[in-house]
Structure formats: C-alpha cells, structure tokens
Amino acid sequence: QVQLVESGGGSVQAGGSLRLSCTVSGNTYRVRSGQWFRQAPGKAREWISTIDSTDVTNYADSAKGRFTISRDNAKTTLFLQMSGLRPEDTGVYFCNCYLTGHTYLGQGIQVTVSS
C-alpha cells in the first residue's frame, strides 16, 4: 500500500528553521509533482508551495523568501525547508504528491513556532 510518510516537524522558536520530509513508502513510485499545505487551528487548509514535474516552483506570499520546496534526486522524497519561522506558521503541514497515476496525501505533521 502506497503511503506518504512525513517527518521533520516539531517545536521551534521564532526565527528558527525546520525541514519537513515527505517520503513515498510501499512502492518505488516517484514524486512527479508535489505540494505542501498547512492548517492552523480553527482555520481552513492553506496552500504553501508547489513543485511541478520540471522542478518549477511556486509559493504562497506567506512563504516566499523563507520556504523552499524540493525533491531528492531519486524523486522519492519531497522536502520543505522552512527558515525565519513565525508563530503564524504554526499548524499541521500536509504533503500532497502526484505519483504514477494517483495523487496521495500525507498524514500531516505538527509544526509549532513559539514567540
């Protein structure tokens, strides 16, 4: 069974950094394109960033200049490098990846930024 396994979340002080990973498990499918979303308490899920099949990236205004989305060379892992974190970045982060013929959603991982 194909799953996306997220890791790298946790608690950090404002100004700190975290690197989220989203790894394909259960098959050798490659990440053809991927996105990161987050959901803050009491708020709707918010799009953060996208990387497409040609490595073109896009970011929400809230993430520009602070976050970087990427894939590893084997294209089995999607990353989100986050720096300059702010308390408003707190939330559950989800990866969403298009693999071979299907789109999969990660289970979500908590990121907490304290002031």
Image (cartoon, helix red, strand yellow):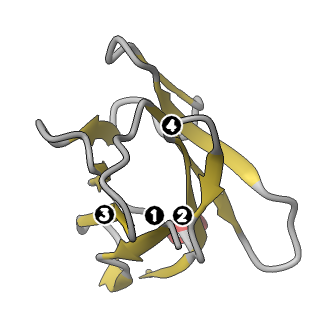
Q: Taking 12 as reference, is 44 left or right? A: right
Q: Say whether disc 1 or disc 4 marks the residue closer to the N-terminus.
A: 1
| Element under disc 1 | loop
Image vertical order of residue 44 relative to residue 57, above or below: below
Disc 2 residue type (three-letter)? Asp
Of labels 2 and 1, the one closer to you: 2
Of labels 2 and 3, the one closer to you: 3
Disc 1 residue type (three-letter)? Arg
Q: Which residue is mark 2?
A: 89
Instruction: Give residue 52's position: percent from left, percent from top.
Output: 45, 20
Residue 86: numbered disc: 1
Of labels 3 and 4, the one closer to you: 4
| Closest to the observer, 68 or 83 | 68
Q: Which residue is mark 4?
A: 100
Residue 98: numbered disc: none
Q: Taking 78 as reference, is 35 left or right? A: right
Disc 3 residue type (three-letter)? Ser
Q: CA distance from mark 2 to mark 1?
A: 5 Å
Instruction: Give residue 54's position: percent from left, percent from top.
Output: 35, 11
